[in-house]
Amino acid sequence: MEKIKEGSVDIIVKKGDITEEEVDIIVNAANNRLLGGGGVDGAIHRAAGPSMMSECRKIGYCPTGEAVYTTAGNLKAKYCIHTVGPIWQGGFKNEEKLLSNCYINSLKLANKLNASSIAFPAISCGVYGYPIEEAANIAINSIKKFLRTYPNNLKEIRLVLFNDTTYNAFYRALKA
Ligand code: APR
């Protein structure tokens, strides 16, 4: 676990399973149709139970880089924010901006929901194939940019990484 302070907000990088985090908001790395899937999306829906999927079906669609929210079912959180990361296509399809938007739009929504704590997974770093070092830098820089740009009531932003490779990349980005 590693922590820095940006203003009055703690940014924490830790290894773990995001479905076990006790925070106001858990962020899901979803797909455009919010249909569930494997990876962290599958794990979050399994842990939350069926109510989350029925809310996702009602919402129906989320554009890449945007964020929507549902209640969090059986998770130890008030809400789940579903954001859709870009599929890596070589870096020439606006992937960097879209991935940054995922973090910024999720944080804006979290603030609207009056959250004081939020946990993110490594969006796009699994089946969507984003190079992990780059994704880690975009995540940390976007979070810092959000905190410097938008007034907010957040106290803690956690990045919860599932394996050593991802944890090490996010650790380096946090310390850079
Ligand atoms: N907790 C935290 N992180 C997890 C967990 C978990 N329980 N399970 C997987 N991860 C990690 C993966 O190791 C990876 O680093 O989440 C990161 C994101 O990987 P994916 O879940 O594959 O997400 P992404 O690359 O954004 O692809 C999204 O995958 O599951 C589908 O429906 C989803 O189609 C969408 C796509």
Image (spheres, helix red, strand yellow):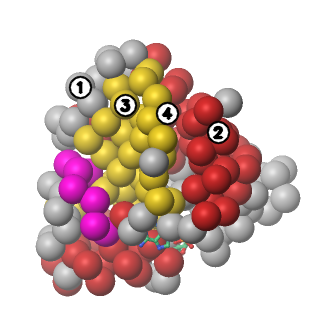
Can you identify the residue that label 3 sits on? 10
**Residue drawn at x 26%, y 41% as measured from the top left:** 117
The type of residue carrying mark 4 is Ile
**Residue drawn at x 31%, y 78% as measured from the top left:** 45
Q: CA distance from mark 1 to mark 2?
A: 24 Å
Task: Answer yes or no: is residue 143 visible.
Answer: yes
Q: CA distance from mark 2 to mark 4?
A: 12 Å
Magenta residues (range): 19-25
**Residue drawn at x 31%, y 36% as measured from the top left:** 156
Can you identify the residue that label 4 sits on? 143
The type of residue carrying mark 1 is Asn
Work out whether residue 17 or residue 106 is closer to the camera in this orientation and state it.
17
Q: Quadrant of residue 46?
A: bottom left
SS label for mark 4: helix
Circles 1, 4 touching at the beta carbon (< 8 Å): no
Image vertical order of residue 19 relative to residue 148, above or below: below
In which quadrant will I find the C terminus?
Answer: top right
Q: Position of residue 60 (x, y in %)?
A: 35, 70
Can you identify the residue that label 2 sits on? 173
